[in-house]
Amino acid sequence: MEIIKRKILLEDYINRSESNWGELTTTAYTMNVFFTQDVDDMGIGVDIPFIAKGVTPPVYTTLLTKLNLSNYTFEFMNNTTTQVAETPYFPNTRYPGKLIESYFINGERVTGMTEDRLEDVKSYDQISPYKVDFDITKGSYKDFKEIPFQGASKVLDNDLMSPITYMIDGDTSETINLNNPDPQNGIIYKTYSGLSRTINVTGIQLNVDGQIETGEGYGNYVIPITRFYYKNQGYNNTNSLLSASTKEEYLFGITSTPKVFSDLFIDRGRATILESHMQLGEITNMRELINYGNGYYKIQK
């Protein structure tokens, strides 16, 4: 423990009036105390895969051996399970006996207003740029469940732009209710050319003197009303992690994932497996063969 001493000047807190000369004008003092702490990084964590409960009981032989050697005791070591009361206030708690699907939440329909995306479904036809059922882009996609579908971006209906209904990366085989769109894939937009709304874009920036002023180009803008409709993915195995983060003993103190450099370069210099052949290539007559390397070759006469 370190003891830090500080001196406080009391002159500012002493009454200097004639009636209460020398009395303190405060009952408490405020000072800044700086706390520092030195800790050792335990290292990176390892995600243990979530194993759903099944018919076959789990095997804890290795874990039980280690716990017994460390004199630790838990209820599961006696084939008993800790009963944890489920509560909606802690939806991320892993309760015993629950299936993996119990932690997932299905997606819901989402609607709102945004800017139009008409440029994404506009063709090169100057007379009729927004052609109904004309695929501007198309391709093969997969949803979050890895189910493939044929997607496209195109205009679904054009009521003289009041509104124009179009989809971005939607399923071409899906039947869309144009009056109340509820797509399962992609996003549906409805843009009304005869209706508009005012948006206020504000922002601040610092001038050369360091003073705050309104950013250039900000203000009120009138844009056509565009509504969007899509179904979010909710919580599923692609955006939710059910792995328990643990610390492996051999990774204590390792703060980053090791990098393996698989490229191997060997510089053999001039010494190769064909060195003897190279030496013979430098010899042109018997005298050079006898004198090479100060008698390197043993000549039988």
Image (cartoon, rainbow, N blue to C red):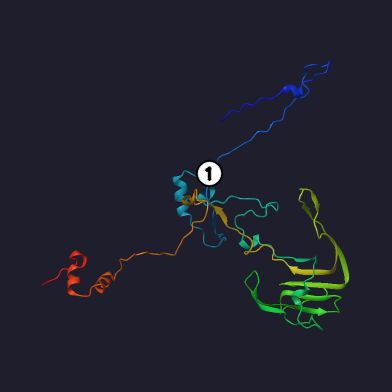
Q: Residues within 10 Å of mark 1 (few under 14, many from 20)?
A: few
Residue 256 in the figure: left or right of residue 301: right
251 vs 269, nearest the viewer: 269
Image height of 61 relative to 157, above or below: above
Residue 6 vertical position relative to residue 22 in the rendered view, above or below: below
Residue for point 20% across, 75% down: 285
Q: Amino acid at mark 1?
A: Asp
Which quadrant holds the C terminus? bottom left
The residue that appears at 65% across and 61% down in the rendered structure is 102
Of residues 101 and 184, the one nearer the viewer is: 184
Asked which secondary structure carries label 1, the reply is: loop
Q: Can residue 225 be seen from the camera position used here?
A: yes
Residue 82 percent coordinates (x, y): 58, 50
Q: Position of residue 231 (x, y in %)?
A: 73, 68
Q: Is residue 41 above or below residue 240?
A: above
Does 2 sit left or right of 186 as displayed? left
Q: What residue is shown at x 80% (from left), y 58% (from top)?
A: 216
Q: Which of the 4 image quarters holds residue 214?
A: bottom right
Q: Can residue 178 be seen in the rendering of this structure? A: no
Corner quadrant of residue 106: bottom right
- To which quarter of the image does residue 144 belong? bottom right
- The percent coordinates of residue 220 (x first, y second) are 86, 61
- Look at the image and tell me in which quarter the N terminus lies: top right
Q: Residue at x 61, y 61 (%)?
A: 100
Q: Which residue is mark 1?
A: 40
Q: Nearer the viewer, residue 136 or 12?
A: 12
Residue sitting farthest toward the left: 301
Q: Position of residue 154 (x, y in %)?
A: 75, 78
In the rendered picture of this protein, how many numbered marks are placed on residues?
1
Q: Is residue 96 left or right of residue 264?
A: right
Q: Residue furthest right?
A: 194
Left or right placement of residue 253 versus residue 5 in this view: left
